[in-house]
């Protein structure tokens, strides 16, 4: 069953067209890697799925994006974003304690019960494999954590609202190799229960983590296939050039 | 030749830079010299906490407690009115308003800041004072409340523009992080943006209050100028500033009264100094 159905999606940010006639389906419980050079529209694509682009005033959209058969423009953005969590490129903890960062989403969706909140925080931190490191630091400011810990905290924070889909926007671009490996392990583990869309600049990461890989170039979806196929026998010459590091 | 030119310009700029500090120090020394002379005649405690201000009776009674309380009451009233409205306005401009309305509001706020205080006082006198009188059935509408309301207008531009800057300074990432978790716009403002901007907003409030406490003309025109300890906000009061402005012309140079007015100046100076320093502390707390 498909989680997302995207048809003829065109996006403009100001006068530039960021996405050109993109159509694709994303299956439930798969990891879809999205690769492409800078300005290829991959982040815009990601931010369209949870309607975060709409915060930009100059944003214009044409085409159809369906989440389980429902047009996302007809879904309340708050409900949509609860279902579709997002982890950003830079670790972005809120200016709150570790505990409050993770509890934030649940609180915003009306959870007041302290015991429940604690359960949610513990479960989410465990899911993000950071509970052991965090359990004695719950009341510290999230800014005191290392970059890798902050990023895994942000994953935990996203998990806390029990999404169905998690969007990762270059989640390891600011991290060292060890933290990157931890985050990648987390993603593979999360795949069991979530649909994951991973935008990455790191071609090798896409190859390691993704079930399928999509290659974007200048706003177009050039090729989408199983990760193995894309990395061994790409159909399009441009895909081949990019993954071999000839440009981008 | 070019070197000489550089040298002269550098020194000129240095002089300009030092001038402001130099003048502040000069003014403060002069204030202190004239103000402290009073304490040879009246003890500082009697001056600060004396309950009656009759500077030209025989013997003169120079207690400024009613004036301090008058200033505090008017300032407190103005803060109660202007802080919520001002911060609300800043939130609207920074977070909610579409571009066109934003521009319009900013122009409006700048214009509000540009109105001379005597005009505010004058308008308050002919419009607000009769209104307060009728609404509360008072013998006179020249009350602390009238002063507070008009001063709130004068504090608003300061509060709005500084609070707005503080809100703009909140990283966009906080906003997106909160939205991405499914928080609503208001939840994001209330739980993330306001706390993140809190030190700047506090500074805005302090500077707004500083503006109010130093204001003279408007309060003199609409607070009734009765130097009695106020029992309610619906009574006439007299502020520190208005006292100096009203009486300095009549005080005999070198008299107790004259020194007392300078001592009031010192008190005001100290109060504004404290307010400005604490605003500064709030502004730089996060840096």
Image: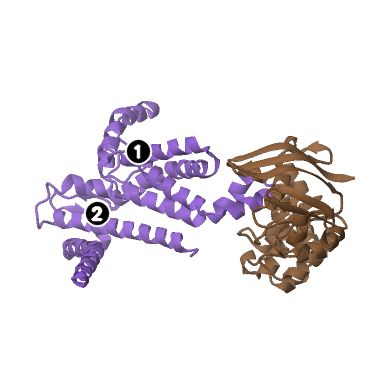
Chain colours: A brown, B purple
Q: Quadrant of residue B109?
A: top left
Please state the chain letter of the residue tagged with numbered disc 1 in the rendered image.
B
For disc 1, the marked residue is B111
Observer-nearest residue: A141 or B235?
A: A141
Residue at 23% over, 69% down: B6
In the displayed structure, A79 sits above or below A229; it is: above
Image quarter where the C terminus of chain A lies is bottom right
Rendered location of residue A84, percent (x, y): 76, 48
In the displayed structure, B204 sits above or below B85; it is: below
Residues under labels 2 and 1: Cα distance?
A: 39 Å
Rendered location of residue A148, percent (x, y): 69, 68
Observer-nearest residue: B97 or B193?
A: B97
Residue A192 seen in the figure = yes
Rendered location of residue B213, percent (x, y): 32, 49
Dot 2 or dot 1, earlier in sequence: 2
- Secondary structure state at the residue bearing disc 1: helix
- Which residue of the protein is positioned furthest toward the top in this rendering? B134
- Which residue of the protein is positioned furthest toward the front in this rendering? A237
For disc 2, the marked residue is B63
Rendered location of residue B212, percent (x, y): 34, 47
Mark 1 closeness class: few <14, some 14–19, many ≥20 residues within 10 Å: few
In the displayed structure, A65 sits above or below A93; it is: above
Observer-nearest residue: B36 or B104?
A: B104
- Secondary structure state at the residue bearing disc 2: loop
In the displayed structure, B5 sits above or below A29; it is: below
Q: Quadrant of residue B186?
A: top right
Mark 2 closeness class: few <14, some 14–19, many ≥20 residues within 10 Å: many
Residue at 11% over, 56% down: B255
Please state the chain letter of the residue tagged with numbered disc 2 in the rendered image.
B
């Amino acid at each position: 069953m498909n989680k997302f159905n995207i048809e003829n999606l065109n996006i403009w940010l100001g006068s530039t067209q960021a996405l050109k006639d993109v159509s694709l389906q994303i299956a439930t419980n798969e990891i879809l890697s999205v690769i492409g050079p800078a300005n290829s529209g991959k982040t815009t694509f990601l931010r369209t799925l949870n309607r975060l682009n709409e915060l930009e005033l100059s944003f214009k959209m044409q085409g159809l994006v369906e989440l389980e058969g429902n047009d996302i423009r007809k879904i309340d953005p708050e409900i949509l974003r609860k279902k579709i969590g997002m982890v950003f490129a830079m670790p972005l903890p809120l200016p709150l304690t570790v505990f409050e960062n993770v509890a934030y989403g649940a609180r915003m969706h009306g959870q007041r019960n302290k015991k429940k909140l604690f359960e949610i925080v513990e479960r989410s931190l465990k899911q993000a494999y950071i509970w052991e490191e965090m359990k004695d630091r719950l009341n510290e400011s999230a800014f005191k954590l290392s970059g890798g810990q902050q990023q895994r905290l942000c994953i935990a924070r996203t998990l806390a609202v029990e999404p169905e889909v998690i969007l990762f926007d270059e989640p390891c671009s600011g991290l060292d190799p060890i933290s990157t490996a931890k985050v990648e392990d987390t993603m593979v583990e999360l795949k069991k229960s979530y649909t994951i869309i991973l935008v990455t600049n790191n071609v090798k990461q896409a190859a390691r983590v993704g079930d399928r890989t999509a290659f974007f170039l200048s706003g177009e979806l050039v090729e989408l296939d199983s990760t193995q196929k894309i990395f061994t026998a790409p159909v399009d010459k441009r895909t081949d050039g990019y993954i071999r590091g000839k440009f981008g | 030749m070019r070197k000489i030119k550089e040298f002269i310009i550098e020194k000129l700029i240095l002089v300009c830079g030092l001038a402001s500090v130099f003048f502040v120090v000069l003014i403060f020394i002069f204030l202190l010299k004239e103000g402290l002379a009073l304490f040879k005649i009246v003890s500082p405690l009697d001056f600060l906490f004396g309950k009656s201000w009759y500077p030209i009776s025989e013997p003169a009674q120079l207690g400024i407690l009613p004036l301090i309380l008058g200033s505090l009451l008017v300032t407190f009233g103005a803060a109660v009115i202007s802080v919520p409205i001002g911060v609300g306005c800043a939130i609207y401009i920074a977070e909610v308003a579409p571009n066109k309305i934003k521009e319009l509001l900013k122009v409006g706020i700048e214009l509000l800041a540009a109105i001379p205080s005597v005009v505010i006082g004058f308008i308050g006198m002919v419009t607000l004072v009769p209104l307060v009188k009728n609404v509360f059935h008072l013998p006179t509408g020249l009350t602390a409340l009238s002063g507070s309301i008009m001063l709130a207008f004068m504090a608003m531009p300061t509060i709005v523009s500084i609070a707005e800057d503080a809100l703009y300074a909140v990283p966009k990432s906080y906003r997106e992080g909160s939205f991405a978790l499914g928080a609503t716009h208001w939840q994001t403002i209330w739980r993330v943006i306001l706390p993140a901007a809190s030190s700047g907003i506090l500074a805005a409030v302090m500077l707004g209050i500083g503006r109010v406490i130093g204001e003279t003309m408007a309060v003199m025109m609409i607070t009734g100028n009765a130097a009695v300890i106020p029992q309610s906000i619906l009574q006439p009061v007299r502020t520190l500033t208005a006292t100096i402005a009203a009486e300095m012309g009549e005080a005999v140079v070198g008299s107790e009264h004259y020194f007392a007015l300078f001592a009031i100046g010192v008190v005001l100076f100290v109060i504004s100094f404290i307010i400005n320093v604490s605003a500064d502390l709030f502004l730089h707390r996060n840096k």
